[in-house]
Image (spheres, rainbow, N blue to C red):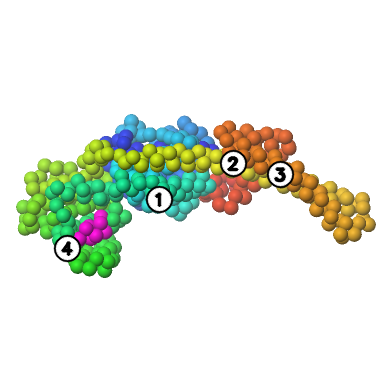
Amino acid sequence: MSLLVVGLSHRTAPVSVLERAALPEGARPKLLQDAVATEPATEAAVLATCNRIELYADVDKFHAGVAELSTLLAQHSSAGLDELTPHLYVHYEDRAVHHLLSVACGLDSMVVGEGQILGQIKDALALGQEQHTAGRMINDLFQQALRVGKRAHSETGIDRAGQSLVTFGLSQLAPATGPLAGRSALVVGAGSMSSLAATTLARAGVRELAIANRTVERAQRLAAALAEQNPGLTARALTIADVPDAVSRADLVVSCTGSTGLVLTADDLAAAVERRTGDGPLAVLDLAMPRDVDAAAHRIEGLHFADIESLAAASADAPMAADVDQVRAIVSEEVAAFGAAQRAARITPTVVALRAMAADVVAGELSRLDGRLPDLDDKQRAEITQTVRRVVDKLLHAPTVRVKQLAGEPGGAGYADALRELFDLDPQAVAAVSRADTRPPTRVAQNRIEAGHE
């Protein structure tokens, strides 16, 4: 089996395509189940953010895997396969590992070095575990990505280059908003990105903060928490229906919902600008994918507007920190380590099966010895048993340790084949050890095992 990722991001697709390819949160479990139901894949995880959609899978056939994953991404989005295909990228084996580790470190983010992606990778792994589509490969890979991302942030200055998308978006609107202290803000949505926006605004010293959400109880909890943490802040919860009126009372609006339709139309915003009584222009930041705010907002006089598309253009001109090269070196080092660990792990069942066979041989010979020398006392029998086992262990120690080391090198899989051939190991015995891994297989892998296909 080999790791494959098929996806698209702000680097390969325009926002109009990303919008159509965006996966509603409720669609992700079905996508995972459909992925592992295909013949090439036994494990799967989906990483979906405001500027990327990626499907990871452990597959046994490259071309079939690419075709199946590409088709699934199209089936679960509003974009057709013909529309998606020109913008899809494919990474396989070590390149797929390199890609995810780079993503985890923020190297592939719209804002280089941003740390929010780690939370999104963690959520992707949790969903795969919840849906039982994350087996040994996906678990190992995503756990490694989280560790490497944290290492990059702790060992380098990548944080100096990286901001959250929220912070970057607010910085783009700063010439219009000026200092946020004492201003009035509206946040639409109460998910992770909206919560980050609300927290950022509260820390920046906004005087009034309204939070609107379809589930008003969630907005109420967030507003209450922020008011408690930030004395002097007036925070309140609104329904989505309240949003058009609330816009006219705000100096800044940040929107990031999971809606598949517009939350604010150009007419809503034009009317809000006319009704405004505050000083200065109205600023609107749309971080949703697909977009919450009509793109025609760019043309409304008295309104300053930024969205994913304009942020992508601005980030392309942002200078990259010198620490990026150091992070790239970390990624390369960790990719090599991950590959070596995976190759070494593949030989472990063969080594275990060899030792089990040796133990069976020892047990059989000791049993025959008992029949030939029935007068041995317990002390003599124990001494002989210990001696025979020690001899076998010493004979096997060097070759099994060395074969694990060699297996970690590129092309090391051949050493497992050599062991099985030289010692005439039963393939079923090796497979049984593989199935006895401490982590349970995914549901589809378990079904295939029970059906006799593995």
To which quarter of the image does residue 351 belong? top right
Circle nearer the N terminus (2, 1): 1
- Residue 207 is tagged as 4
Residue 154: which numbered mark, if any?
1
* Residue 12, x across and y down, in percent: 32, 34
Q: Residue at x 17, y 43 (%)?
A: 295
Residue highlighted by disc 2: 344
In the image, what residue occupies the spot 47% across and 40% down?
333
- Label 3 sits on residue: 397
Q: Per the image, is 198 magenta?
A: yes
Q: What amino acid is at disc 1?
A: Ser
In front: label 1 or label 4: 1
Q: Earlier in the sequence, mark 2 or mark 4?
A: 4
Asked whether the residues under the numbered discs 1 and 3 touch, taking CB atoms below 8 Å apart as contact, a structural biologist would say no
Horizontal side, residue 60 vs residue 364: left or right: left
Amino acid, disc 4: Arg
Could you tell me the amino acid type at mark 3? His
Tell me the distance, in whole angstroms, between the alpha carbons under discs 2 and 4: 58 Å
Q: Earlier in the sequence, mark 2 or mark 3?
A: 2
Q: Position of residue 80 (x, y in %)?
A: 32, 36
The magenta segment is 197-205
* Front position among marks 1 and 3: 1
Helix, strand or loop for disc 2: helix
Is label 4 or label 3 in front? 3
Q: State the separation of the CA atoms marked 2 and 3.
A: 16 Å
SS for dot 1:
helix
Q: Earlier in the sequence, mark 4 or mark 3?
A: 4
